[in-house]
């Protein structure tokens, strides 16, 4: 024995949720919620720390900030679950840049000592 639509009276398929004739919802459908992984904050803190310390490596933390930024950005880039790898790349660039900046200044300072 088949089911019939309460709105138009047409026969429904056994597993249908909607009447194909009139469009009335014939069975209550429970909503399913989907949370995509892209909304995960995995790695956000570590990546942000690498950017902050990479930038602070220029001033006032000088070489210490550069090294902390370098280490945290390498850890962030090597973590497969990190959703913020682009931010870790920025931290890596800032850390390398600030470290190179201070090393160049030290070399120039030593060279000017001899001249």
Image: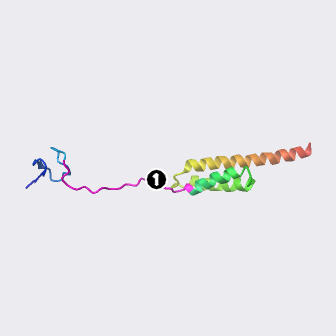
x 80%, y 46%: residue: 105
Residue lying furthest front: 7
The total of numbered circles placed on residues is: 1
Which colour scheme appears in the figure? rainbow
Q: Nearer the viewer, residue 36 or 8?
A: 8
Whether 64 is drawn above or below 101: the answer is: below
Q: What residue lies at 11% left-to-right and 47% top-to-bottom?
A: 8
Left or right of residue 40, residue 52 in this image = right
Left or right position of 29 against 53: left
Residue 74, visible in the rendered structure: no
Outermost residue, top side: 115
What residue did someone put label 1 on?
39
- Toward the left, the furthest residue is 1
Place of residue 75 in the rendered image (x, y in percent of width and height, measured from the top left): 60, 56
For mark 1, give the secondary structure.
helix
Q: Is residue 13 visible?
A: yes
In magenta, the rendered stretch is 24-44
**Could you tell me which quadrant the C terminus lies in?**
top right
Q: Where residue 102 appears, x then y in whole percent?
A: 77, 48
Q: Is residue 27 magenta?
A: yes
**Mark 1 surroundings within 10 Å by alpha-carbon count, few (fewer than 14), some (14 through 19), many (20 or more):** few
Quadrant (top left, top right, bottom left, bottom right) of the N terminus: bottom left
Q: Main secondary structure of the magenta part?
A: loop
Query: Residue at the spot x=59%, y=50% of the render?
Result: 88
Q: Is residue 71 left or right of residue 113?
A: left
Look at the image and say whether residue 1 sits in the magenta stretch: no
Which of the two residues, 49 or 9, is positioned nearer the viewer here?
Answer: 9
Front-most of 9 and 48? 9
């Amino acid at each position: 024995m088949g089911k019939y639509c309460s709105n138009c009276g047409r026969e429904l398929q056994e597993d249908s949720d909607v009447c194909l004739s009139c469009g009335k919802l014939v069975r209550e459908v429970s909503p399913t919620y989907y949370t995509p992984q892209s909304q995960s904050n995995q790695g956000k803190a570590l990546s942000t720390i690498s950017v902050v310390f990479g930038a602070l490596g220029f001033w006032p933390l000088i070489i210490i900030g550069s090294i902390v930024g370098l280490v945290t950005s390498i850890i962030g880039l090597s973590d497969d679950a990190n959703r913020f790898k682009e931010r870790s790349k920025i931290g890596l660039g800032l850390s390398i840049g600030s470290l190179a900046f201070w090393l160049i200044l030290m070399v120039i300072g030593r060279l000017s000592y001899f001249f």
